[in-house]
Amino acid sequence: MTARQRFSMSALSQMRYRFLLGALGLVLIVLLIRQQNGLSHSNLAPIATTLHKNPSEASSDITLTHGDHSLTQLLENVSATSTYFTDYPLPASEFGQMGKRLQVMQHWIEARQSVSDRMTLGQADTLRTHIDDIALSLFPFLHNPSQSSYTSLSHLRQRFKPGSKGIVIPTGQKTFRYACHLISNLRDTLGSKLPIEVAYAGESDLPASYREFINGLASDIETVDVLRVFDDTTLDLEHGGWAIKTFAALGSQYEQVLVLDADAILLQAPETILDHHTGYKSTGTLLFHDRLLWQGAFKERHEWWEKQLEHHTPSQALSKSRVYNDGYAEECDSGLVVLDKSRLSVLLGVLHACWQNTKEVRDKWTYKMGYGDKESWWFGLELSGAQYTFEDHYGGMLGHLNADKDKVCSFTIAHFDEQEKLLWYNGGLLLNKLKNNTEFDVPTHYMFDGVWEKGATKPDHSCMRDAEIRETSEQERELVRKSVEGAKAIDARIQQSSSLDFT
């Protein structure tokens, strides 16, 4: 069955299918947990029902049935669920089922919040402990190695400063120079006042001399070792490459975060997104599309996506996806990801994305079925039941006209706001950082919704054709020129230091 055929199934057929699946799942869970724990059927039924209901239905049941007796039953059910999740861990291949377990955990957290005024302190502590046990069984990396005491999801949430907003830039020695360019672009060119965290994975990833240089670039910058926030046993982030990005987002002290690749360049202040983007304000998320390339070339990837999304009601974002529905290769350009972690559904979606970037899971599945962390963001939000927003257009082109003046060509991918104005682009300020590490560029033209002509190799430029060619404004060119001047000044300082690598 194709993706489009799945979306065209009647609502009645989907309801019947989910009912049969739920009934089968209930029987299996009852048998497994009774055999393991000797629990009564009355204790198990609410657990199995919650595992297979829609989130809104399960939450309604919890809210409507809480009396004094039901509070006790709730604690018993959460305890049994915690035991079940611990005794029956999911293999690395079960992305869909991990999403279901996160939805169960969301139900319990919401239930605790809805009946908190009717709980004793002891009951509240017991329920919180059970929820933390569930979270830790699913995500052992939540243990904070810098704290000797027990830590889990509730402690992580306490790390977030209420109402805070900030920028997170993961980097290491290899991308350090571009991260410095980006900081200058944000502070000196755009005048952003948002605080910045530069995230890294251990001393060898970003040594002290590099951190000192970064801290001296501007005010309100902090460097954060992610290995001091999460237990690295199942992560190996020092050698994980892109994997650090999801954990930098989750572990940041900011509730609302803009996670930026080191080689991203913004053409509008990041505050604009947080304060004015209607899609972001609606869902607490903003993701950006990759290029529409290689249609039909990755059948195994699409078959795997569809398998993980079996028995899942597609979100509005997925129902509009040209990549998922029309067979293109890559959905997300994760050079900029915007998240509001104060929203529980978003936070749990980020947890799913982090799980996808743990060492075993990324090595076996995530990075084999996709390119790095790209697809883990939307896939985690989708499978955990969160609503999320993608930009309206797929990745565009920002560069220069070709000789025939019918194409725009470059080495970057451009992204746009809701008014179709340039918002940011990836690839950095250099014309082609893979060929020349000192030649900067100020783009003059852009295009979106055209046809991509991909360069034969990474060092070769790509082009876009068959859409309106637009000229960058003088204001946009001046922003880039100012960013280039800031980057050159930073490069001169780096080259003067004997302890920093200029690459």
Image (cartoon, helix red, strand yellow):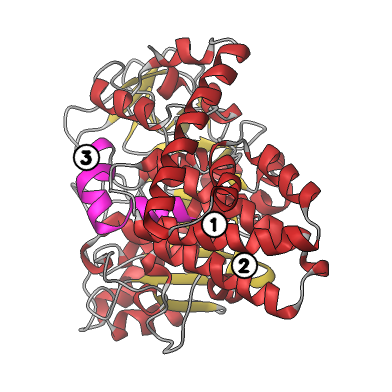
Residue 503 image offset from top left, x and y in percent: 21, 63
- Marks 2/1 in contact by CB < 8 Å: the verdict is yes
Which residue in the protein does label 1 denote?
A: 258
Residue 255 appears at what percent x and percent y?
62, 64
Q: Amino acid at mark 1?
A: Leu
Question: How far separated are the C-alphas under marks 1 and 3?
Answer: 26 Å
Q: Please identify, in this view, whether the residue under mark 1 or under mark 3 is nearer the observer.
A: 3
Q: Which residues are magenta?
A: 351-369
At mark 3, the secondary structure is helix
Q: Nearer the viewer, residue 287 or 422?
A: 287
Q: Which residue is mark 3?
A: 368
State the mark number for residue 194. Answer: 2
Tell me if mark 1 has few (under 14), some (14-19) or many (20+) residues whose alpha carbon lies within 10 angstroms of its own.
many
Q: Residue at x 30, y 23 (%)?
A: 303
Task: Locate residue 96, reporting x and y percent.
Answer: 41, 38
Dot in front, 2 or 1: 1
Q: Was residue 100 drawn as part of the magenta stretch in this picture?
A: no
Q: Secondary structure at mark 1?
A: strand
223 in relation to 35, above or below: below
